[in-house]
Image (cartoon, grey):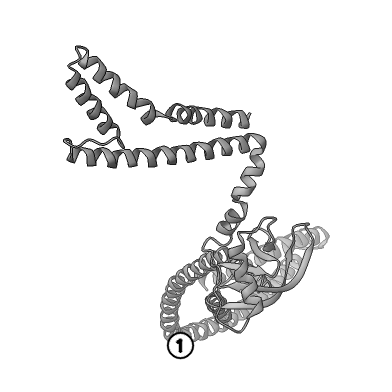
């Protein structure tokens, strides 16, 4: 307010100075034109009186404006004091609200971290469930659940209650279906590569078969494939029994490897197939092997019979008999002793050696067969 007052006073003084200068200029002109000094003096006095009156009028207006400004200033100060009295409670309330907002923001941040952790855990679990259920034999029976599993595993927002319930129901459905034997209409790919439809039977989460044979599950494209080779007939008979008596208790094949063991059983070669694969060389090996086995059995039985006779002769050395090698040697030894032959020792050795050919008969042929069979096997592989 003081600055405005000084500015107003300066303006008045400047106006007065300008007016005096103007009057002086006019006076100078008129002085030149005045006829006498008396007229000039009279005019100057009149102008001075007029200027003083104008100055007093301006000063009066200034004082009136100053009073008005002071009154306005007083009213503004009073209004300010009133506003300050009203503002203080609002400021206190604002401070309280600010503190409360900060607390709420802190709680929101903490809860937001928990919710983000919940979202991450849900997506991780949904992904694990998706990967696990993709390997399940239930997939061909319920292919429509794949879209829901993909949606849950790729969820980029906070999971809702419906999402949690959906994941729970999918797990519950998998456990329920995997614990039962289900017969349903489905499709599979046969040996020629054509897609067939028909009645499929799923034994829990282990084996799936149709009337044509056991099926292999391919998780990469969620397809059931009919292998070109099936297991032995004793396994195939379980399928026939099931379709022949579907309402009775039947023994079924369970493959815990989800088709790998059945595939290996189907790929295993039977003895007849191996003989056909071996060809002529295999037949020769089998014939020689059979001869070797028969000869070995004959020689083993003969040697056992000789062993029994020799053991019996050992119990009766004083009464030798000719049905065993030891008895025959003892009989010849007695003859040599009675004759008192000088070559007794040599003839006794000759008698022992004479018994060896009968005991070793066929051993060389068996040895030959044992050496020939591996060589023929190598020839067959070549």
Give the residue at x 57% y 39%: 286
Give the residue at x 41% y 37%: 299
Whether residue 137 is visible: no
Q: Give the vertical position of 378 relative to 110 (above or below).
A: above
Q: Is residue 102 left or right of residue 324?
A: right
Give the residue at x 46% y 31%: 366
Residue 163 location, quadrant: bottom right
Q: Give the vertical position of 169 relative to 133 (above or below).
A: below
Viewer-proximal residue among 166 and 240: 240
Q: Position of residue 99 (x, y in %)?
A: 41, 77
Whether residue 227 is visible: yes
Q: Is residue 81 left or right of residue 142?
A: left
Viewer-proximal residue among 379 and 118: 379
Residue 146 location, quadrant: bottom right
Residue 207 location, quadrant: bottom right
Q: Position of residue 179 (x, y in %)?
A: 52, 76
Q: Residues within 10 Å of mark 1 (few under 14, many from 20)?
A: few
Residue for badge 1? 86
Q: Outermost residue toward the front?
A: 339
């Amino acid at each position: 307010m003081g600055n405005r007052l000084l500015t107003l006073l300066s303006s008045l003084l400047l106006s007065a100075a300008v007016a005096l200068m103007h009057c002086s200029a006019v006076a100078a002109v008129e002085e030149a034109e005045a006829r006498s000094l008396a007229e000039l003096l009279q005019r100057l006095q009149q102008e001075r009186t007029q200027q003083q009156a104008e100055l007093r009028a301006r000063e009066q207006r200034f004082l009136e404006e100053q009073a008005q400004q002071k009154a306005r200033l007083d009213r503004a100060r009073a209004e300010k004091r009133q506003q300050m009295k009203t503002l203080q409670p609002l400021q206190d309330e604002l401070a309280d609200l600010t503190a409360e907002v900060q607390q709420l923001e802190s709680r929101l941040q903490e809860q937001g971290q928990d919710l983000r952790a919940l979202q991450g855990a849900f997506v991780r679990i949904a992904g694990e469930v998706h990967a696990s259920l993709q390997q399940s034999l239930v997939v061909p029976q319920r292919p429509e659940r794949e879209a829901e599993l993909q949606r849950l595993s790729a969820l980029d927002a906070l999971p809702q209650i419906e999402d949690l319930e959906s994941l729970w129901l999918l797990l519950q459905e998998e456990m329920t279906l995997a614990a039962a034997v289900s017969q349903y209409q489905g499709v599979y790919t046969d040996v020629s590569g054509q897609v067939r439809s028909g009645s499929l039977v799923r034994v829990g989460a282990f084996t799936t078969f149709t009337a044509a044979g056991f099926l292999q599950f391919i998780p990469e494209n969620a397809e059931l494939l009919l292998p070109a080779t099936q297991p032995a007939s004793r396994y195939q008979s379980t399928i026939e029994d099931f379709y022949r008596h579907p309402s009775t208790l039947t023994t079924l094949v369970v493959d815990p490897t989800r088709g790998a063991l059945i595939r290996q059983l189907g790929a295993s070669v039977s003895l007849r197939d191996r003989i056909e694969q071996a060809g002529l060389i295999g037949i020769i090996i089998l014939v020689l092997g059979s001869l070797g086995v028969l000869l070995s059995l004959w020689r083993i039985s003969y040697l056992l019979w000789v062993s029994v006779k020799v053991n019996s002769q050992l119990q009766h050395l004083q009464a030798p008999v000719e049905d065993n090698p030891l008895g025959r040697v003892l009989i010849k030894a007695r003859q040599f002793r009675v004759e008192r032959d000088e070559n007794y020792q040599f003839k006794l050795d000759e008698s022992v050696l004479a018994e060896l050919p009968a005991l070793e008969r066929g051993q060389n042929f068996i040895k030959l067969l044992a050496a020939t069979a591996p060589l023929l096997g190598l020839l067959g592989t070549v």
